[in-house]
Image (cartoon, rainbow, N blue to C red):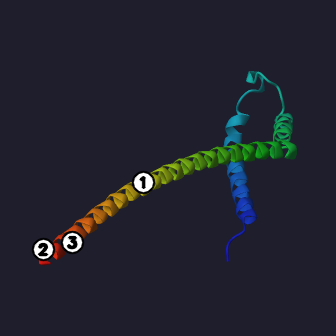
């Protein structure tokens, strides 16, 4: 269903090569009119192309490309490691804060339930005293 990337890359390469050849073909008549004596470097066109090819071959050597890719992967891994450390620290801080709040709420709940228990005990004692006083008044 999808077009393969190698096909797209091939088409783009051919299109760019064709565009470069078109530009060169358009400029050749103008370049021919330049007198050879005016050129400071008397390097021939083929020698120039050979030099450019050598430079590109050394620059695009597979070992260099692998080293570049490895360096980029190392950068990405380092960045992801730093991000994961920061996320871990953030989550730890949030968990610590939540635990602290939970403990505070639990203590508050205990204090309130203890106070309510004391209140209930007092009210029971008062009701018992009232009942006793009522039973004493009746007798």
Does residue 106 appear to the left or right of 83 in the view shown? left
Spot occupied by residue 24 in the image (x, y as percentages of width and height): 70, 44
34 or 56, which is in the foreground?
56
Which residue shows up at 69% across the image and 53% down it?
Answer: 16
Q: Quadrant of residue 133?
A: bottom left
Spot occupied by residue 72 in the image (x, y as percentages of width and height): 73, 44
With respect to residue 112, does 3 lie above or below?
Answer: below
With respect to residue 41, does 64 lie above or below?
Answer: below
Q: Which quadrant does the N terminus fall into?
A: bottom right
Q: Earlier in the sequence, mark 3 or mark 2?
A: 3
68 or 86, which is in the foreground?
86
Give the class, few, some or many, for how many residues have Cα within 10 Å of label 1's Cα (few <14, many ≥20). few
Give the number of the disc on residue 107.
1
Asked whether residue 130 appears in the rendered view, the answer is yes
- Circle 3 sits in a helix, a strand or a loop, which is it? helix
Give the number of the disc on residue 137.
2
Which residue shows up at 73% across the image and 22% down it?
Answer: 38
43 or 3, which is in the foreground?
3
Give the number of the disc on residue 132.
3
Give the class, few, some or many, for how many residues have Cα within 10 Å of label 3's Cα (few <14, many ≥20). few
Q: CA distance from mark 3 to mark 2?
A: 9 Å
Q: Which residue of the protein is positioned furthest toward the front in this rendering?
A: 139
With respect to residue 40, does 12 lie above or below?
Answer: below
Which residue shows up at 24% across the image and 70% down it?
Answer: 128
Give the number of the disc on residue 41.
none
Spot occupied by residue 91 in the image (x, y as percentages of width and height): 55, 51
């Amino acid at each position: 269903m999808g077009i393969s990337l190698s096909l797209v890359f091939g088409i783009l390469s051919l299109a760019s090569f064709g565009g470069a050849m078109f530009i060169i073909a358009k400029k050749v008549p103008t370049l021919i009119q330049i007198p050879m004596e005016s050129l400071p470097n008397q390097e021939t066109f083929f020698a120039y192309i050979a030099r450019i090819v050598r430079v590109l071959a050394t620059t695009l050597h597979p070992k260099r490309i692998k080293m570049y890719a490895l360096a980029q992967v190392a950068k990405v891994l380092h960045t992801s490691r730093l991000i994961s450390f920061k996320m871990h620290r953030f989550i730890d801080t949030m968990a610590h804060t939540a635990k602290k709040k939970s403990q505070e709420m639990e203590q508050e709940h205990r204090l309130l339930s203890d106070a309510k228990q004391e209140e209930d005990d007092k009210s029971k004692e008062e009701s018992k005293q009232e009942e006793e006083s009522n039973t004493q008044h009746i007798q």
